[in-house]
Amino acid sequence: MKFFVMAKTVLRNLFSAPATRRYPAIRRPYYKNTRGSISIAVDQCIFCGMCSRKCPSAALTVVKAGKKWTINRLRCIACGYCVEVCPKQCLAMGNHYSASVQAKTEETFSHA
Ligand code: SF4
Ligand code: SF4
């Protein structure tokens, strides 16, 4: 009896698609609401600092005098709270993850 159960499993696996993908040739598509990485339309930013004050992981630094907005992506937990609180709606949560890095770097954006 167990033989038939096992044979059924073997046959099913022989004729079905594999559970894994041939990464990186075949990549899993991101879902529409996947929380990936934060981006900023810095030209619309007024450097009010609301996003950095509300960020639970202190990933954001805003310098109003220098008009600089900085994100430490290794600290960001992709909660999306900064996007919600920004009064100018210049922050967005992309559904693609940021590129992997080898060093603890910060990204700074400022008006051109
Ligand atoms: S909350 Fe919005 S407008 Fe204010 S500093 Fe952050 S990104 Fe800029
Ligand atoms: S998504 Fe969350 S953790 Fe990341 S910068 Fe915005 S508020 Fe901070």
Image (spheres, rainbow, N blue to C red):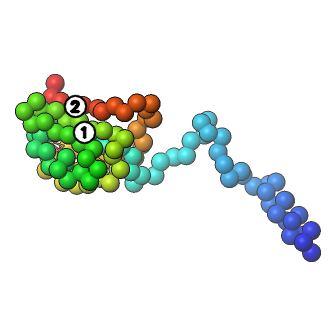
Q: Amino acid at mark 2?
A: Phe
Residue 77 visible somewhere in the drawing:
yes
Q: Is residue 3 left or right of residue 82?
A: right
Q: Residue at x 30, y 38 (%)?
A: 72
How packed mark 2 is, by other alpha carbons closer than 10 Å (few <14, some 14-19, many 20 or more), is some
Considering only vertical position in the picture, is 14 above or below 25? below
The kind of secondary structure element at disc 2 is: strand
Q: Is residue 90 left or right of residue 76?
A: left
The kind of secondary structure element at disc 1 is: strand
Number of numbered markers: 2
Camera-side residue: 99 or 57?
Answer: 57
Q: What quarter of the picture does the N terminus occupy?
A: bottom right
Disc 1 to disc 2: CB gap under 8 Å? yes
Residue furthest bottom in the image:
1
Pointer 2: what residue? 109
Residue furthest left in the image:
65
Q: Residue at x 9, y 36 (%)?
A: 64
Q: Amino acid at mark 1?
A: Ile
Ligand 1 rendered quadrant? top left
Please give the label number shown on residue 40.
1
The percent coordinates of residue 111 (x first, y second) are: 15, 29
Q: What quarter of the picture does the C terminus occupy?
A: top left
Please give the label number shown on residue 112.
none
Sequence-wise, the earlier of marks 1 and 2 is: 1
How packed mark 1 is, by other alpha carbons closer than 10 Å (few <14, some 14-19, many 20 or more), is some
Considering only vertical position in the picture, is 24 above or below 8? above
Q: Is mark 1 within 8 Å of ligand 1?
A: yes
